[in-house]
Every structure is written in C-alpha cells, then in structure tokens.
Amino acid sequence: MIKHALTLAHRGDIILIDAALQGNQIQPNAIDITCDHLYRNSMISSASNHKFVLSNDTTTHVVKEQVDPVDNYYKNLLLPVYYFESNLEITIPWGFVAWLVTRSSLNRNGIRVESGLYDAGFKGKIAGTLYNHSGVNIDLQRGARVAQLVFAEAETLHKYDGQYQST
C-alpha cells in the first residue's frame, strides 16, 4: 500500500531530516525532489580511463564532476546522462520503502529520472540519474523539482546496511 510521507511523519514512522522542505514540494501522493547539485560523467570531458566496476567483492563508481550553475541555472544540458542530488535527507523506517518517479512535466519533454529502491534503514540524501532523450539543450534551474519520492509499506526482512554514500 502506498503511503504519503506526511502521514508517516505524523505517525513518527519516517524522519525528514532536512527542515528545508518547501510547501510546494508536498504533493497529494509524494514529495517532490529537487535538483540541488548536478554532475556529469568526468570521462566525457577528460581523457580519463576510469570505468564502473561491479563485482561480488567491490564496486568502483564512475568519477563525476560537478556542473556549476550560471545565474542559478544549469545551462545547455545536452549530454544524455547527468547525475543529480537533492539537499533533502531522509531516513526510511522499518516496514517501508521509497522510490523516485519522474515528474510528468519532464516526462512529456523527453526527460526521465531514475534511481534505485530506497530500503528500510536507508539514511541519506536522495539522488538519481537524469536522462535527456529530448535531443535539445535543457536549462534547469538549481532547486527545480525533477522527481517525486513515493513511499510504500513493504515486508522488511532486515534494515539496509549498505555503505553506498560513504564509499
């Protein structure tokens, strides 16, 4: 069953750590997630031979470089893939999961947002990947709402104990 984050917060089930949640981020069934920091794959703009490696023992992540806003906008975004991070930090409680879905206004313009499932026990910033399938440059205001975080009740076998954001 899908639950609204504010209902969970009032029950004490979920902790919204970031007090900067704006009223316009609260939607009927989700919380809007903003793009507060934007990154691109550094291999695109350099001669680096760094690559993503995934094995049973280790993960080596893609090296990212920050995109600096100009007049509070990330301008002329034509590359097909960017990574974004929101300033919103959350804790997912026992018995719940969350995931990001693309805002319909972006979807209608050929832009998609993806992220993994946020398991019970996850604590940290919400982040994702922004895909530009439109074929045109995008100007994205820093702090623009790009995705919605949806919560659902789920059987939880154990809490998330990963180290993704600290590696």
Image (tube, rainbow, N blue to C red):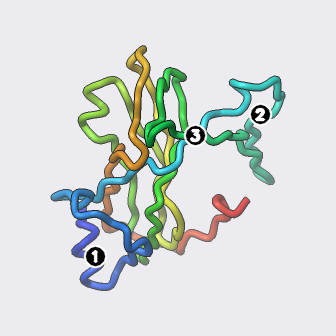
Write down the residue under mark 2. Answer: 51
Which residue appears at 40% of the width and 29% of the height? 139
Task: Using the numbered discs, state the Cα–Cα distance from disc 1 to disc 2 in whole angstroms.
Answer: 39 Å
**Position of residue 30 measured from the top left corner of the image (x, y, whole percent):** 26, 58
Instruction: State if disc 1 and disc 3 touch (CB < 8 Å).
Output: no
Residue 118 numbered mark, or none: none
Q: Quadrant of residue 155?
A: bottom left
Relative to 21, 60 lies left or right: right
Check disc 1 and report the residue beneath it: 8
Q: Is residue 103 left or right of residue 69?
A: left
Q: Amino acid at mark 1?
A: Leu
Residue at 52 percent across and 48 percent down: it is: 37
Looking at the image, tell me whether mark 3 or mark 2 is earlier in sequence order: 2
Residue visible at 43% across and 77% down in the picture: 94
Q: Which residue is mark 3?
A: 68
Q: Amino acid at mark 2?
A: Lys
Q: Is residue 1 visible?
A: no
Neighbor class of circle 3 (other Cα within 10 Å; few <14, some 14-19, many 20+) is some
Quadrant assignment for the N terminus: bottom left
